Amino acid sequence: MNVEIITPDKELFNGEASSVIVPGSDGLLGILNDHAPLISSLTNGDVKLKTTDGEKTFTVNGGVVEVLNNKVMILAE
């Protein structure tokens, strides 16, 4: 699935990942291919991606995640 992580200042990541874990406001959310459509707010924490290059971690201070048609967009602070 395609993943984009964007902050007000820059794009942190844009590429393919096999799984994504985000700090949702009600707890951790795990996202895999063909996940149902979803919009959720994020709290402070780490976004973890599994890519072909290994695991990548990005720290966010809140934001929003949208999942739609195997695309994950994270608008982070």
Image (tube, rainbow, N blue to C red):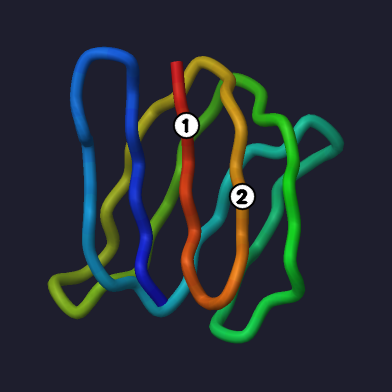
Identify the residue at image location x=47%, y=31%.
Answer: 75
Amino acid type of disc 1?
Leu
Rendering coords of residue 19 (x, y %): 47, 72
Which residue corresponds to the image point at 46% horizontal and 26% vertical from the top-left?
76
- Amino acid on which disc 2 is placed: Glu
Q: Secondary structure at mark 1?
A: strand
Q: What is the spatial separation of the Cα atoms under label 1 and label 2, in whole angstroms? A: 9 Å
Left or right placement of residue 65 versus residue 28 in this view: left
Q: Could you tell whether 27 is left or right of 48 in the image?
A: right
Which of disc 2 and disc 1 is earlier in sequence?
A: 2
Residue drawn 22% across the image and 36% down it? 12
Instruction: Give x and y (percent) for residue 18.
Output: 40, 79
SS assignment at label 2 = strand
How packed mark 2 is, by other alpha carbons closer than 10 Å (few <14, some 14-19, many 20 or more), is some
In this picture, is 54 found above or below 76?
A: below
Quarter of the C terminus within the rendering: top left
Q: How many discs appear?
A: 2
Residue under pointer 1? 75
Proximity of marks 1 and 2: CB atoms separated by less than 8 Å: yes
Q: Residue 66 has which mark?
A: 2
Badge 1 density bin: few <14, some 14–19, many ≥20, Cα 10 Å: some
Observer-nearest of 69 and 77: 69
Residue 5: x and y in percent read: 35, 41
Farthest residue, direction bottom: 34
Q: Residue furthest front?
A: 69
| Of 51 and 1, the residue lying toward us | 1
